[in-house]
Image: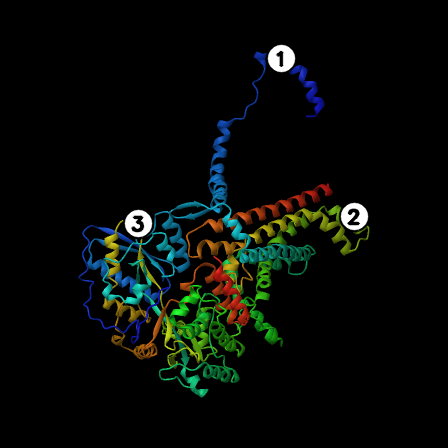
């Protein structure tokens, strides 16, 4: 209803006697509450309360005998905690590098399938399969692949005469984190590819055909038409991947436990160590880590969301 | 710091069984009760069989009392206990290790000073579990740090196992270089899935160089890591690293793989390892055990020239059972643990598990093909002065994490210098 329609209806409504007027519309709470309640209970119990409780814990020493208020002591200690900041650096490196690799390679693979390369059906299944495996299985698998003595990578290098390049990939500070980033790239590229392939198939064919009539080159078509049209999908995949990497735990725990020399320590693994492997029942300090990281992740997601909205406005 | 001195032949297992088996004499518990036991060792059949046998005997001696056992892997058990104990829903009896001082600090453990026949438990093992004069755990598993050797390979290199004294560091380094010259990896080690095996040589060297008291003070943060004796000890380990003594993949090799690396493929000269080595190695070879004809020898870690204590070595208590302070059946739980504390059960542990125990036992009663090994182990331990606990059991918090990352892993894989080890450990000792 436009503003003009509303203005025209107002005198008509005013002329109706009060006894004949329909009662003002009220929300039907009796019907709404039963529908909302289960979800609200789950949300409050399993999301909101843990968040609030974690923040509460972060300013207390949380011991079985009771909580002791320590104010900002945990945060002050965290500020000087070298291992925490190293974990932050590693996690941010992962959260920036992995999405770019995953989505970039996925776009190339999706384009290959879109262009109907031979064996496309098989390749789609093959590339997608890794995401069906759990991080635990993937972690074990890749610790074997990276094994110094008999792992596939080093066996291959030795076979082609590059014996000097053989390396304990997960055991060297310089290579451990890149080696793990490669694993998540291998694991998630197929998923991104499938989503992008669906986006490519939903592109309006008339736009592509018009470009072809204009004798647009393949590269120009990709750069000026295809990528701008799938940009919302690309950005969503980047955000999802980035958030996933900010929480990464399982793979690191299975493959390196944060070593060597904390070179693969992530915020999640460090939080776990401080909570469960530090010979203390105190959950205050790990809660401070979780709180700080929660704020950082929320800020990152907010920034990416804002960027995404800007792009959409420009597009439309 | 808990340091006790004990000079005895094969401390962990050489005390004669003098008391009759106490199982039949265990006080009968009148009412029908169920004790819950949460235990590690889900995948360790010999230990599990031993515990199941103890449960069977206890139940037979105490009609009306049943023990319901839940088996876990260690990490899963620890996680479950943390939440269950906090919630007041823990089991009556559970597995713990002496480094888990947080249980004692938070009053989760029942005082076991009464109700256990401590005469049947090694005094040092009881001491490890003693806090403020109270004993909190029954020490089942004990082990020493040993230097295993492939005697055939050693002879091929012109070396031999010294009859009682250790090699000097110079002799040892020479053997390492000779092995490398023949393309043999000298020392097997794997730290990919454990926080301690890569540090065995380092802490044993530090222990001998500093002596019991000062070594304890070093771990307590009372002696600095830039102490010349410490630096000197670290330099010896670094010389081994520089001589390529350790496998190139040591940083990621797992414990089980390091066993195979020592005895089968490719086969190394030495293997510094806990004496529980045999609980894997004495399995059939198709189950990961060493070859039947493997020439296993036991020798001492090489001693520094100016060692404060050449007879010093580490002994540790591992798996133990404790009682939940909130148990509703404290008497039955104590009686259950007391059922383990008999020489008969100690001998049963030795025969089944092939590892030392904190329960007094008599290794001379062990018969069969492994008897020779236990005599050899007793000889290697003869006259030893023991320090109790490896650094991972003594250090806490950041110091422990740093020791694991730096000394256990990066140092022996050649990724950090001696100066960096000193810097990192000094910083960690000062931090929380």
Tag 3, which chain?
B
Q: Quadrant of residue B124?
A: bottom left
Identify the residue under disc 2: A210
Position of B215 compared to B235: left or right? Answer: left
Quarter of the figure with the N terminus of chain B: bottom left
Front tag of 1 and 2? 1
Which residue is at the front of the view, B29 or A222? Answer: B29
Q: Chain of mark 2?
A: A
In this rendering, would B232 be left or right of B312? Answer: right
Which residue is situated farthest in the right direction here?
Answer: A214
Q: Say which of A174 and A225 sits in front.
A: A174
Query: Is B251 on the left-hand or right-hand side of A110?
Result: left
Instruction: Please say if B223 is above or below A54.
Output: below
Q: Are marks 3 and 2 on the same chain?
A: no
Q: Earlier in the sequence, mark 1 or mark 2?
A: 1
The answer to whether residue B188 is left or right of residue A168 is left
Q: Nearer the viewer, residue B160 or A104?
A: B160
| Residue B123 percent location from the top left of the image | 28, 66
Q: Position of residue A180 (x, y in %)?
A: 57, 61
Where residue B228 appears, as percent x and y from the top left, is 49, 73
Label total for image: 3
The residue carrying mark 1 is: A16
Q: Nearer the viewer, residue A278 or A120?
A: A278
Residue at 25% across, 56% down? B334
Cα distance between the residues tagged 1 and 3? 75 Å
Q: CA distance from mark 3 to mark 2?
A: 78 Å
Are the residues tagged 3 and 2 within 8 Å (C-beta)? no
Residue where numbered disc 3 is placed: B326
Name the residue at 34% across, 48% down.
B89
- How many other residues sit within 10 Å of disc 3, few (<14), some (14-19) or many (≥20)? some
User: Residue A237, position in %: x, y?
Assistant: 63, 50
Residue A268 visible to an observer of this rendering: yes
């Amino acid at each position: 209803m436009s503003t003009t329609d509303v203005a025209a209806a107002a005198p008509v409504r005013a002329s109706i006697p009060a006894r004949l007027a329909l009662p003002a519309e009220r929300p039907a709470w009796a019907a709404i509450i039963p529908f909302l309640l289960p979800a609200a209970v789950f949300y409050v119990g399993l999301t909101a309360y843990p968040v609030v409780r974690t923040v509460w814990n972060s300013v207390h020493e949380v011991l079985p005998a009771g909580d002791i208020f320590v104010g900002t002591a945990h945060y002050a200690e965290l500020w000087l905690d070298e291992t925490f900041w190293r974990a932050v650096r590693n996690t941010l490196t992962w959260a920036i590098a992995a999405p770019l690799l995953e989505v970039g390679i996925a776009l190339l693979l999706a384009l290959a399938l879109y262009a109907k390369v031979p064996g496309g059906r098989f390749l789609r299944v093959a590339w997608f399969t890794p995401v069906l495996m759990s991080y635990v299985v993937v972690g074990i698998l890749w610790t074997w692949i990276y094994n110094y003595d008999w792992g596939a990578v080093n066996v291959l290098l030795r076979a082609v005469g590059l014996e000097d390049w053989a390396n304990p990939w997960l055991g060297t500070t310089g290579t451990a984190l890149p080696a793990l980033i490669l694993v998540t790239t291998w694991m998630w590229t197929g998923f991104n590819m499938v989503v992008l392939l669906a986006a490519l198939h939903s592109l309006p064919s008339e736009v592509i055909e018009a470009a072809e009539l204009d004798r647009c080159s393949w590269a120009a078509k990709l750069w000026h038409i295809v990528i701008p049209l799938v940009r919302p999908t690309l950005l969503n995949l980047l955000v999802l991947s980035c958030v996933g990497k900010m929480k990464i735990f399982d793979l690191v725990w299975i493959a390196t436990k944060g070593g060597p020399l904390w070179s693969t320590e992530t915020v999640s693994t460090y939080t776990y160590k401080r909570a469960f492997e530090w010979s203390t029942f105190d959950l205050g300090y790990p809660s401070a880590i979780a709180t700080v990281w929660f704020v950082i992740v929320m800020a990152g997601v907010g920034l990416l969301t804002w960027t995404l909205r800007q792009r959409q406005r420009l597009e439309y | 710091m808990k340091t006790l001195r004990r000079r005895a032949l094969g401390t962990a297992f050489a005390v004669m069984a003098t008391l009759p088996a106490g199982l039949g004499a265990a006080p009968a518990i009148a009412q029908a009760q169920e004790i819950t036991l949460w235990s590690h060792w889900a995948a360790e059949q010999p230990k599990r069989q031993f515990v199941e046998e103890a449960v069977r005997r206890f139940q037979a001696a105490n009609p009306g009392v049943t023990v319901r056992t839940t088996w876990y892997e260690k990490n899963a058990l620890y996680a479950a206990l943390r939440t269950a104990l906090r919630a007041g829903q823990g089991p009556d009896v559970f597995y713990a290790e002496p480094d888990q001082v947080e249980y004692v600090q938070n009053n989760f453990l029942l005082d076991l000073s009464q109700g256990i026949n401590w005469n049947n438990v090694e005094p040092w093992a009881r001491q490890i579990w003693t806090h403020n004069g109270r004993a909190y755990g029954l020490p089942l598993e004990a082990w020493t740090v040993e230097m295993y050797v492939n005697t055939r390979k050693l002879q091929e290199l012109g070396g031999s196992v010294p009859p009682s004294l250790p090699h000097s560091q110079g002799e040892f380094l020479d053997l390492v270089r000779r092995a490398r010259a023949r393309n043999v990896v000298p020392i097997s080690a794997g730290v990919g899935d454990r926080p301690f095996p890569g540090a065995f040589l380092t802490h044993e060297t530090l222990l001998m160089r500093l002596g019991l008291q000062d070594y304890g003070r070093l771990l307590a943060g009372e002696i600095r890591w830039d102490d010349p004796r410490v630096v000197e000890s670290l330099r010896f380990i670094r010389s081994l690293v520089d001589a390529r003594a350790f496998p190139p993949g040591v940083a990621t090799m797992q414990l089980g793989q390091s066993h195979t690396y020592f005895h089968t493929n490719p086969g190394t000269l030495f293997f510094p390892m806990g004496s529980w080595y045999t609980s894997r190695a004495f399995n059939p070879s198709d189950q990961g055990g060493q070859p039947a004809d493997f020439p296993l020898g036991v020798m001492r870690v090489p001693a520094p020239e100016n060692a404060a204590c050449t007879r010093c070595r580490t002994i540790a208590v591992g798996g133990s059972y404790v009682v939940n302070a909130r148990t509703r059946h404290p008497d039955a739980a104590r009686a259950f643990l007391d059922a383990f504390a008999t020489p008969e059960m100690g001998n049963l542990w030795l025969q089944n598990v092939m590892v030392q125990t904190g329960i007094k036992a008599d290794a001379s009663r062990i018969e069969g093909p492994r008897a020779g090994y236990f005599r050899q182990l007793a000889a290697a331990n003869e006259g030893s002065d023991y320090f109790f606990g490896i650094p991972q059991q003594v250090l806490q918090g950041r110091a422990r994490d740093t020791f694991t990352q730096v000394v256990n892993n990066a140092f022996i894989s050649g990724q950090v210098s001696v100066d960096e080890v000193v810097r990192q450990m000094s910083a960690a000792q000062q931090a929380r």
